[in-house]
Amino acid sequence: MTASQEMATKLMTVEEYVAARTGAEMAEVFGAIAAAARQIERKIRRAGLGDVYGAAGAVNVQGEQQQKLDVFANDLLTELLRGVECVAAIVSEEDEGPVEFGRAGAEFVVVFDPLDGSSNIDVNVNVGTIFSVVRRGGDVVASVLRPGTEQVAAGYVLYGPSAVMVMTVGKGVAAFTLDEDERFMLTAEGMRMPEQGFYYSANEANAGSWPEVYREFVRGLVARDLGGQEYGSRYIGSLVADFHRTLLKGGVFLYPPTKKAPRGKLRLLYEAYPLAMVAEKAGGAAVDGEMRLLEVRAAGIHDRTPLVIGSRIEVEALRKAVLKTAEEVE
Ligand code: FDP
């Protein structure tokens, strides 16, 4: 790439990037997500100055305390996407069912977790928005319950020291950084996750209640059994931030089944599916332990799943170990 081509690439907004690859309708969807992300970022940046920390007083459909910023982010995304003609409905972590916009011919449904890792807000630690776009095929619920392989676009926004949107419209993974003029500008294209990496990321306080095969896997990483690779441990407890590091540096994020959450803690539709699509498009992998994550089927919109996601070598090694254990048990 010549220097002038590189400049041209860098001067592209996320809306322009999407329009050039998939057309104006999807660009409008991204425009609404970017607009919401801008406002969420502004609110988070000034969180300590206003009355935005803490619980909103309600409990969401997951039985979790809703934070004020959860509610703010959810309302904003819903309203901005309502303004996009090609969006038929949204499905959010914060709502019991889909919110339909009454547009029979609209093509897309947007699924999102408006503010992931929200237990980190009060301590000024990174949080994120995760989203996925699927085509509406008749009933909205049936459309979003199709396998993750059917997603047409997916991504996340990480509200960190800078705000970054990482996304795919099915052809490679790109990152956009929020600039001073509040535009998400292209800062990386064709992103690739390292084949093997330097960090593993898990809430090890739960290790006592993981299936033994996961404990053994992590012990193996620490012992450098995986090709002699040396690992460090990193766990933020904000999925978007933990995933983003894994995407850039390689390694593996795992949230195995636990005694308390035998079917996993993380949500399939609006956490695992979008990140799995990004991971795969960047050359990484994601499984629920045994299966390719994008082929795991949800029965309900708020279903949970175990999640192992990251570099291909670590994810494959874990999957092989889990499958072997399953064989031995049979
Ligand atoms: P949070 O409960 O703060 O919203 O999906 C929720 C999530 O955060 C993820 O962002 C994070 O990876 C995970 O839960 C953290 O769970 P633990 O506190 O059990 O480690």
Image (cartoon, rainbow, N blue to C red):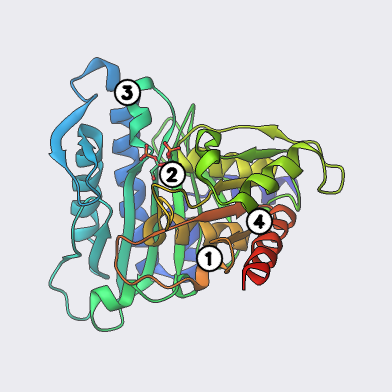
- Mark 3 sits on what residue? 122
Q: Residue at x 55, y 44 (%)?
A: 243
Q: Residue at x 59, y 57 (%)?
A: 279
Looking at the image, is 13 positioned above or below residue 101? above
Looking at the image, is 186 positioned above or below residue 262? above
Looking at the image, is 146 positioned above or below residue 188? below
Q: Name the one closer to the observer, 185 or 142.
A: 142
Q: CA distance from mark 2 to mark 1?
A: 21 Å
Quadrant where the C terminus lies?
bottom right
Of the two numbered discs 1 and 4 in the rendering, the one whose residue sits closer to the viewer: 1
Q: Earlier in the sequence, mark 2 or mark 3?
A: 3
- Mark 1 sits on what residue? 293
| Ligand 1 lies under 8 Å from the Cβ of mark 3 | no
Looking at the image, is 181 positioned above or below residue 320? above
Rendered location of residue 299, percent (x, y):
33, 72
Q: Secondary structure at mark 3?
A: helix
Q: Is 121 on the left or on the right of 192, as rendered?
A: left
- Mark 4 sits on what residue? 190
Q: CA distance from mark 1 to mark 4?
A: 22 Å
Q: Secondary structure at mark 4?
A: loop
Rendered location of residue 206, percent (x, y):
50, 38
Q: Is 49 on the left or on the right of 222, as rendered?
A: left
Q: Earlier in the sequence, mark 2 or mark 1?
A: 2
